[in-house]
Amino acid sequence: MNSRKLIVLLVVALLVFIFFLFDLDKVLTLDYFKAQRDGIITWKDSHPVLATLVFFVVYVAVTALSLPGAAVMTLAIGAVFGLIWGFVLVSFASTIGATLAFLIARFLLRDMVQDRYGDRLKAINEGMRKDGAFYLFTLRLVPIFPFFIINLLMGLTPIRTWTYYWVSQVGMLAGTLVYVNAGTQLATLESASGILSPGLIGSFVLLGIFPLLAKRVVSLLKQQKALKDWERPDSFDRNLVVIGGGSAGLVSAYIAAAVKSEVTLIEKHKMGGDCLNTGCVPSKALIRSARILGQSRRAEEWGFDAIDVKYSFRNIMERVQRVVTEVEPHDSVERYTDLGVDVIEGEARITSPYSVEVNGVELRTPHIIVATGASPFVPPIAGIDQIDYLTSDNLWQLRELPERLLVLGGGPIGCELAQAFARFGSRVSIVEMMPRLMIREDEDVADLVARRFKEEGINLMLGHKAVEFTKGEKSNLLICEYQGEQTEVAFDQVLVAVGRKANSSGFGLEDLNVALNPNGTIETDEYLQSSIPTIYACGDVAGPYQFTHTAGHQAWYAAVNSLFGVFRRFRVDYSVVPFATFTDPEVARVGLNELEAAEQGIDYEVTKFDLAELDRAIAEGEAHGMVKVLTPPGKDRVLGATIVGENAGELIGEFTAAMKHGFGLNKILGTIHIYPTLFEANKYAAGVWKRAHAPETVLSWVERYHTWRRG
């Protein structure tokens, strides 16, 4: 630190030290002012110029040094000087003091912070250069943010000093007026009964609702700013246009039609989206067939000598398509047309915040919902473009079973499909760069699945990073890096299952500069509104979850907020999101697991129940897996639950309900569960928790009581 900075730092520290040394903080309290009010007003009347100067200088000093008491001084100035003169005095004093605090922070800290954290602050710096004035204005307008923090933090950014001054001056006007007005009412308080005066009550009501009003004003200003380059039409053809006929789009359109709005749904490919055509429905149909085959090989466990299952892989895949065809009417054009939705098959393009073009026709609408889903992500691995790779999109065209199948990715999709193909007879290798499967799950959970995979002959290549694909005359090869050395794996076909990327480009969002997150999903607020206020997004294209059930969940919020947001908006609720991976054993979870609790610094205790002890699991020959519940130490509230085992995706529902509706393990334990069922596992897990929290002191006295009763 150079000498000039050191001098400034010492001066600031000395002034702050003097402030607290002489207990000046007690002077800047409401009680002190009320006790000295009459004397202060008399002194001001006798020396108006000096009083104005003193109050002005003190206010500037308090604000510049970020000392406590600025709010009380604002009230006091309102009481002493009245509304108009007090408003002028506070307005300039607060802005000058804020700017001095800003300059002190900038002089002392900005270079150090930017040098150390410049890379991490690059996006913030760029945003401040581009829209710093607007950001600052919104912060000043909504007084829920402590102004002294704004002063200090803004000093670390590249915003210009003059910009900071005039934006602060304008942005704080409304809040200043409200606080000074409250001070004028406090001046009339003569006794305890005066607290009930209409003027004082009205002033404090205004203080209470001002942040809400200011937030609404900020929201309107943001909307105007985002839409300033487009002219709003005088009339519209329909109330809502939904782009995408998957789960999110279908639910959005259904809700819009149910509330009697004119809604158009546009789908360029197949109704039902990924879930029906390439995701949930076909994969679960395939897994069901594979499971029957897998169970037939365990015939002796159920008392059979053998079960000989003859099958054709072609027939299996044809059955999968029949299942898709059977479900199709649920998501068909005809069904949604009957529900009142105007369905258009074609490729949509958003041409403005108020219009969508499809099949050469422009549709005018006040709101648009983007529900375009996601597609398999193909990593940029050398040579992959030379391989006819499979994804969860084109996998269903297979009619011949690959002899050697390489699955790239050990997440939910990769694990589900790898196990299915292994059961049909493929020699399956899973290449996963992380040290274990299902990296988002706890280690003991992933180990249970990995153990079953190894038993079924799946080759797990964990900790292997895919480096390059090569195509030979007789075999394809993947070169991997493992612990600093290269290794090869031969395959006939490769399934790429390393994740999914949002379908957020190619239909006009770029032309409107709709903001995207770093992973390509559309950036939305808590109401699922994008950076263009008339455009909402839901489902996989919005994230953060890529599940069919969360897409449908989001769709309700997107539809209701877009149609009725002028009256009331609803924040999307992600507090309780269950999900499952349909391997054998299944893995289902809701809420936190141990990994997430540790990452978030949340104290917890773990309760486990081994399904090997459950009667129904033993009878079914599925006595493996566990129920694991996280609770706060000493309490029965469910923070999260993970179930590994038969029908885990069904069993997790009770813990989902417990988290959503606020009942704990004691209530689960006190609920009758049918015997013998797998469902009892939840009750037994609650019983394990109860035994661990038995009141030992009380029980010792109960034991003595029973001993006494026996004589």
Image: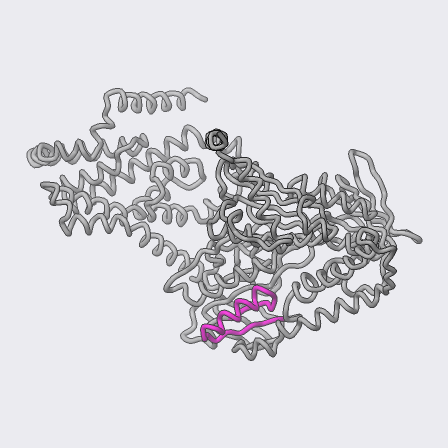
State whether residue 387 appears in this view: no
Residue at x 53% of width, y 58% of height: 513
Give yes or no for residue 245 being in the magenta stretch: yes
Image spot of residue 229 (x, y percent): 45, 63
Q: Looking at the image, is 530 positioned above or below residue 670?
A: below
Give yes or no for residue 629 being in the magenta stretch: no
The region drawn magenta spans: 241-267
Image quadrant containing the N terminus: top left
Image spot of residue 299 (x, y percent): 83, 54
Residue at x 59% of width, y 65% of height: 247
Q: Observer-nearest residue: 317 or 273?
A: 317
Residue 275 relative to residue 170: left or right: right
Residue 548 relative to residue 183: left or right: right
Which residue is situated farthest in the right direction here? Answer: 474
Q: Looking at the image, is 471 positioned above or below residue 27?
A: below
Query: How is the rendered protein coloured?
Result: one colour
Which residue is situated farthest in the front direction here? Answer: 711
Q: Observer-nearest residue: 423 or 421?
A: 423
Image spot of residue 611 (x, y percent): 67, 45
Residue 681 relative to residue 222: left or right: right
Residue 8 relative to residue 661: left or right: left
